[in-house]
Amino acid sequence: MANATIELVNALRETAHRLRNGANYSWGHHGACNCGNLLQVVTHLSESEIRKYAHTANGEWTELAQQFCPVTNAPLTLVITKLEALGLTPTDIHHIEYLTDREVLQNLPGGFRWLKRNKKEDAIIYFETFANLLEEKLLSNLHININTIVPAKKTVKAVEEIIYA
């Protein structure tokens, strides 16, 4: 699964928000499909610019992510590099395009079910669930040492003041 980052969580949420609010969605279009919409958020490129980059190689996003080579400096590397910098792997890109990550699907509201890769509403719920799952992972890894925030002598009193305020 993707490396949980605040940037990735925000990008997934923004993609879902844009789709929910009328962003163009066309699964067969490199710039307006699941990955294309995420890339619009991440790169600030238009769907036609993303499509142009994607057409410098052959295949769907699944194949494009697998063929990615950071040494070639082909234009496509820009968009794939952006996704990887967020914490995604080629496998994650495949799952986003086809809405198939089992961990995301198991955490869908209402429980596990298969989603349709070319259905806008399914893409929205997938992006939202993926963001929620990654956010939970971020929060579970968050460790706060109260002594680093409040000096040791004042810890109990400070905590009581926060709790009973």
Image: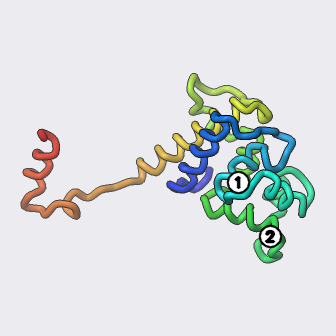
**Is residue 77 rendered to the left or right of residue 88?**
right
Which dot marks residue 130? none
Q: Amino acid type of disc 2?
A: Cys
Circle 2: is it few (<14), some (14-19), or many (20+) Cα within 10 Å? some
Which dot marks residue 39? 1
Residue 126 placement (x, y as % from top left): 64, 36
Cα separation between marks 1 and 2: 18 Å
Q: Give the residue drawn at x 52%, y 40%.
A: 132
Q: Give the residue drawn at x 74%, y 43%.
A: 34
Mark 2 highlights which residue? 69
> Foreground: 86 or 108?
86
| Picture quadrant where residue 77 is located | bottom right
Residue 84 placement (x, y as % from top left): 66, 61
Q: Give the residue drawn at x 57%, y 43%.
A: 13
| Picture quadrant where residue 86 is located | bottom right
Considering only vertical position in the picture, is 25 above or below 52? above
Element at label 2 = loop
